[in-house]
Image (tube, rainbow, N blue to C red):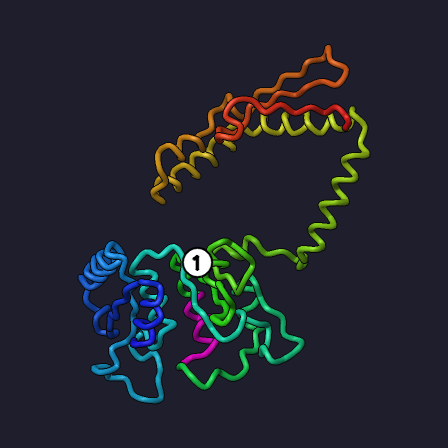
Amino acid sequence: MAIYDTLFSQLDVTSSQLLVTDRDFRDPSFGHQLRETVVSLLDLKVIPVFNENDAISTRRAPYEDSSGIFWDNDSLATLLAKELDADLLIMLSDVEGLYSGPPSDPQSKIIHTYINEKHGKLINFGEKSRVGRGGMQAKVAAAVTAASKGVPAVIASGFVTDSIIKIMRGEKIGTLFHNEANVWDCSKEVTTREMAVAAKDCSRHLQNLSSEERKKILLDIAGALDANVDLIISENEADLAAAQDSGYEKSLVARMTLKAGKVGYLYISSSQQYPFIYLIMFGHSICSHYIFVDNKPC
């Protein structure tokens, strides 16, 4: 704990150690007390540092999950993430994330999004490090458990500069575990370069279209909006409910609110050589009134 105090103090940040045991979590009232303690510390700008209370722990080697609660820091982190209703669990390791095989193997590739149905039985974890109890296999098990309980998890390297900040920015770093990751699965891995090249090719293709072809595309989009008003409104209502549950400000929720008139209206001025298409769409601040789309060739 002394090293945490030293490092945090260099940033004028206070830290506090909280020691727990698996027996604590057997008490139904412990979760409420735990949340109150953590909230109070954070209100005081104090960083809580959790660890198992080894002084009174009854565990003996070989270490195993005999309690079914937690048995190492990885499973403890998952348990705390659930108890504290965390938005995200980040587990730092000595490698950049989860690999398809031992990280030392040149053939191994990093897995940026873990899908249990796809990767669960295909990964060769190799040997664990000399420190810790469970190694990467334990981290994966903990991350899968966290994701199944609604807490996304990321395994990344603690040796990469600003890795936590990069994760919070949404950068593609480490391995993400999410309970809906299977929905995002693609049959083919596409690199950033391939996506950029494909986008550029499509841009050139659009530029080569005639004005009539562009007009037809815009009309098809408008028709699809008009035909799916009920579905769009329904999905928007679900998004609004999720935003309210997440504690978004009322003003932000109001900006996301869609009404039928904002989705389906289409007007074409046929008297123009290059007709203007006016679409009333999403109620965000950047398009709170009209979107003017001119299909005149550039």
Q: Residue at x 36, y 66 (%)?
A: 78
Q: What residue is pinned by disc 1?
A: 152
Instruction: Please name the predominant secondary structure of the magenta segment in the image.
Output: helix
Instruction: Name the side, left or right, on which 8 lies relative to 165.
Output: left
Q: Amino acid at mark 1?
A: Pro
The answer to which quarter of the image holds residue 46 is: bottom left
Q: Which residues are magenta?
A: 133-143
- Identify which residue, 52 or 147, lies in the foreground: 52
Residue 75 magenta: no
Q: Residue at x 35, y 76 (%)?
A: 72
Residue 135 magenta: yes
Q: Is residue 192 above or below residue 124?
A: above
The local secondary structure at tag 1 comes to loop
Q: Give residue 60's position: percent from left, percent from top.
A: 29, 88
Q: Give residue 99's position: percent from left, percent from top.
A: 57, 72
Is disc 1 surrounded by few (<14), some (14 to 19) or many (20+) residues within 10 Å?
many
Instruction: Name the side, left or right, on which 24 lies relative to 244.
Output: left
Q: Give residue 114's position: percent from left, percent from top.
A: 53, 63
